[in-house]
Image (cartoon, coloured by chain):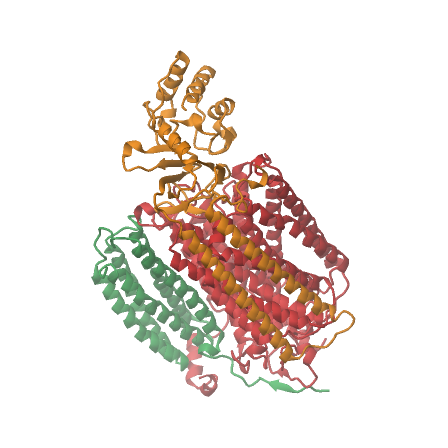
Chain colours: A green, B red, C orange
Amino acid sequence: MSRPAIDVSELPPLAFGHRGIVWWATMGVIAIEGAMFVLVMVTYLYLKGRSPHWPPGFFPPDLRWGTLNTIVLLASTVPNQFAKSAAEKFDLRGARFWLVVALAFALAFNIIRIFEFRTLNVWWDSNAYGSVTWTLLGLHTTHILTDFIDSCVLAGVLYFGPVKASLMVDLSENSLYWYFVVLAWLPIYALIYWAPRLA
Amino acid sequence: MSAETDQLAATWQDPPGLLGWFSAVDHKTIGIRFIVTAFGFFILGGLEAATMRLQLARPDNGLIGPDLYNQIFTMHGTTMMFLFAVPLVLAFGVYFVPLMVGARAMALPRLLAFGYWIYLFGGIFLYVMFALNIGPDQGWFSYVPLAGPEYGIGKRADVWAQLITFTEVSGLIVAICLVTTIFKLRAPGMSLNRIPLFVWSELVTSFMVIFAMPSVMIASTTLILDRLVGTHFYNPADGGDPILWQHLFWFFGHPEVYIIFLPAQGIMSMLLSTFSHRPVFGHQALMLSLTATAFIGFGVWVHHMFATGLPQLGISFFTAASIMIVIPTGVQIFCWIATLWGARIRYDTPMLYALAFFVIFIIGGLTGVMLASVPLDLQVHDTFFVVAHLHYVLIGGSVFPLLGGFHYWFPKMTGRMLSERLGKIAFALLFIGFNLTFFPQHVLGLHGMPRRVYTYPENMGWGTLNLLASTGAVTMFIALCIYLANVIISRRSGAIAGENPWDAPTLEWTTSSPPPAYNFSPLPTVTGTDPVWEHTDEVPIVVGVASECREVLVTHVMDAEPDHKKEWPEPSIWPLWTALVITGLFIGSIFTPWAVVVGAIPATFAMVGWFWPKRGQSPEALIRRLEAGDHPPLEQVL
Amino acid sequence: MGQAIQSALNPTGIQAARISDLYWLMFWTSTVVYVAVLIALTVAIWRGRRSDAGEPSRATAAKWVTAATAISIVTLIGLLFASVATGRAMGSLSTENALGIEVVGYQWWWSVKYKNPTPSLEVTTANELHVPVGRPIAISLKAFDVIHSFWVPNLHGKVDLIPGRENLITLQVDRAGVYRGQCAEYCGLQHAHMAFNIIAEESDAFERWLTAQRTPAPPPSSPELTSGLAVVERGPCQMCHTIRGTTAGGRFGPDLTHVATRSTLASGTVPNTPDALTSWIKDPQHIKPGTKMPSTGLSEQELQALVAYLQTLK
């Protein structure tokens, strides 16, 4: 007695984007981290709403390093996108190259971030404004730092191996996370650097 | 049995030995670990409850002093909410969701293993600190400034805040695994509107976890920052606000109770259907109700803050939302009654728990409507009336279905039936004991007894009702001991269960009890919501998935059409190492912020060890192959 | 006494009365709903007790579920209206000629100050509020340390005292009597022992009380009382307590200028008798473990003199 059967033996062994498992895991992380960013931003606005002066008696953060970093972050999406496209075409050489270029940008924006902290013009323990500003910037910093580290590790695997074709999927989804980290920065930049000026 | 199933077994088995035990990634193995651990914490939380009830049995009782009592009620709430209820509702998902959707495994298995270890280590951490007299004592919602740097002396509040971090990381991880599994690993034919209602409830719950738990993470992290490094989030003298804490906590805290409730509603649909042998009435309406409850559940949190003096206009919105959220649950109750209409019921123990839901939960729902009304809430808020309400909804609405669900699923997990006699005795005692414990508490609250008091004066007239409640608590304790005894005895000598002892309709009952490591062979497809009752031999099976390596069929989100086959991760010890290192980082960081920096280094190494591929070719060899065109045909993957 | 003290179902103020009415409306509505649902469930099961009676047709079942849902919605909206109406009634109490009081919550006692445009006419006491019957009382609520909650169930719902914020509660008492209240927000070790009394009396009795409270402490009239005062002024008491008319001006503990007129000590924990007062001063930690008042290590003689002196503070 034979039962009817659906034969899936010819199906491919991997898939990019929302068809694949890694995409969903990455999106799950993005949803969680995104929710955290939104909540800290809402906290910022809440504390601002309760404060007659914002910042209370301090200068707002210097614009120079934050604006520069915004440009660097946005620019980093270019090699990031090239790395993604190369991965999806199974161009391992190209993907490796663009990942390293993106890493150079990542190193830059992590270093510039140090200068951003130094020119916030407030300490985290001065008052609630300082606390939420440092926390918001700090939360984003953990993301750019981990993005840098995990991209380094990915580059390491791509150069030293062992590798499989499915690594191309990991590379593609890593780019997705990179986009998230860059795009999440935009409203945070607006809050930290411009909200105190537009009071 | 056959050569193929032998090979599948060899491929999918958990590795042997001690190292194998620590490296296991099988969702059934991890599911059982979660369930056993959650029940362990249930026992501890129950002992805490029993201790409180003994202290409150008489006015001016001297059994326990205020310091220990305050720690105990904090530990009770924290344990039950974070270490028992949420892990257990997710754990049933971990074990049964892949089976109910016809998959061979759960998505992201190593991440799942990590999620378990982090939960276990967090719970152990909390109890070790309690034993060392550094257990938290600020209540399970830890209001500031009581929990803040000035009045929360010592490390107690930090221990609580970090426990949150452990359990929330665990919950978030399990949620991601569940969403990915439910969306991507379903058997062909199981379109989204055909998935079992329990699976749908786990999906909706996982989304709630993803959007609610970040709020309590932010809350607990900012609390630790205030306490450890001098930030001012909650310090009114420097621009902070104690009410901010309440917003951040309850924005999580309210969805939290729906996280605990929704899977139980999924279990209700399942039990009522099986024991009446009727497909559930209103499958779509029930799916929509669960979804609506989840959405509205995010819009009611301020009803925990009615007494704080917030502006009237905003508050009225929350009253309306808190009343409206009753409606989807009402729809579910009416659909369940329609399901049972005229059905011949089998009164096995799981069904008794399901029927008890109606008697108990509805009372809790109705007192909830009372609490939604601001003027009435201002009288009964923070009294034993609320304690009564929350236990009626959580125990009647969640614990009873969970205990029934556990009784129902025990044969599938262990291959043996629980004793019906012991099961019914435990049920009866629990039902009586529960009502005896908590019904009088409604009256106590209305008669002025606030919550979280370690004692009360003689002349308040509260003594009799408190004694009644304490007697009920003892009864509940005995009932749960009998339930536990049933589990222990039946594990060894219960009747052999067979594949489908309850004649239930869903896919987990089409495989052996317990299921083999590979869950199903052959892999099933479905054509309706109740596969076992609807199936004929004409329903196709799936062939072409490899059995000599860990390969899983991945399908489309909406209609579960086959899409591709993915190689699944092998068992690994790295999730355990990473969990140990992260535990050290979390614990260290309540004593010094440098622990984060220092701990990040071994954490990074652990995660690198976890991620680094174990098998493959050299990059140069792969480049040559890819450039030669030897890769999956592009038109199949793009 | 018995269950009438501190009970939301024994209202003696207009607000608590309205809330109690709302409660009973909701209680009876809930009872009807609950019984109806359980009857439906019982009938559903009863019909299948011998054998499955057959599934109802989808259309019939859908009709009944929809009808039940519609009835639920209408009932809930009705209750929502009742709630809103009650809330509005709460807020409609006129505050004309209101008596202004400021209550500050401390771990674990209540400071009570009767406001007056002339500062010298302000009265500060602790753990007891005297109020005139039939006149609105506007109480502003502040917290010194952590969140507390002011709750007198016989009169009104509770309102929290939150550090950094000022909340307001407006009460009116309709009947003379003593009404017990208790802190209703967990505030630490002795949250359970943070009660207070509202003593409502006729207008003239209230005015007499208020005037008497304005007078400073009488000078000691015997050697024992003099040494009792000396204990206050030269010992640890004056570091936390104020007794107007002496040099004791501490602000961390209750004002003791008229402590002998109060009916309880330690925020409602023990009755105000000489024995209880003696035990309290000798070892506060025994009566209220965790209280901020330390044992003072006074000798028996000093203690006796101190208690005698405090008894004169009427």
Q: Is residue B591 left or right of residue A115?
A: right
- Judge whether B508 appears above or below B381 on screen: below
Q: Residue B195 at x, y = what percent?
A: 59, 75
Task: Residue B308: tell me if it is visible.
Answer: yes
C57 and A48: which one is in front? C57
Out of B417 and C157, give the one closest to the viewer. C157
Q: Quadrant of the C terminus of chain A?
A: bottom left
Look at the picture and state if B6 lies above or below A187.
below
Query: Which residue occupies the extreme top position in the image?
Result: C223
Task: Residue C282: give x, y in percent of width and height.
Answer: 48, 23
Image quadrant in which you'd find residue C187? top left
Which residue is found at the position 37% from the left and 55% from the top?
A: B311
Q: Quadrant of residue C123?
A: top left
Could you tell me if residue A97 is visible in this image? no
Query: Quick check: A173 above or below B480?
Result: below
Quadrant position of residue B504: bottom right
x, y percent for residue B571: 56, 66
Q: Residue B27's spot in the image, x, y percent?
A: 59, 66
Residue reaching furthest right?
C50
Q: Quadrant of the N terminus of chain A?
A: bottom right
Q: How many marks?
A: 0
